[in-house]
Image: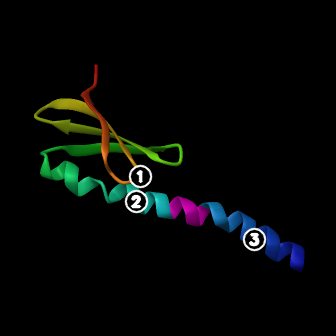
Amino acid sequence: MKRFLIVCAVLATPTAAMAQVSGAITECLPAFEEQGFVVTGMDVEGAELFEFEAVRDGVEWEIKTNDECEVLIQQPES
């Protein structure tokens, strides 16, 4: 029984961490919306880098932020 509980705890840990990251990435969305962006995709790149695909005025953009939602790269996609 102890082995079963340990395995369940280990398997549940990544899911909880992923939920925290998922919540953090969505916290960045209002700032983009205020700038006129419509976010069409988002992804977590590593532990501290978020990547967004967005459209503004018919132009597709690539935006990368850290986990504090500070913009590191914001450029039109080529």
Mark closer to the observer (2, 1): 1
- Disc 3 residue type? Cys
Q: Give the colour scheme of this rendering.
A: rainbow
Disc on the earlier residue, 2 or 3: 3
Disc on the earlier residue, 2 or 1: 2
Disc 2 to disc 1, how far (Cα)? 7 Å
Mark 2 and 1 residues: CB-CB less than 8 Å, in contact? yes
- Say which mark, if any, is on residue 24: 2
For the stretch drawn in magenta, the main secondary structure is helix
Residue 31's x, y, as percent? 21, 53
Callout 1 crowding tier (Cα within 10 Å): few <14, some 14–19, many ≥20: some
Q: Which residue is mark 3?
A: 8
Disc 3 to disc 1, how far (Cα)? 28 Å
Q: Residue at x 18, y 43 (%)?
A: 37
- Say which mark, if any, is on residue 67: 1
Residue 24's x, y, as percent? 40, 59
Snapshot quadrant of residue 71 = top left
Snapshot quadrant of residue 28 = bottom left
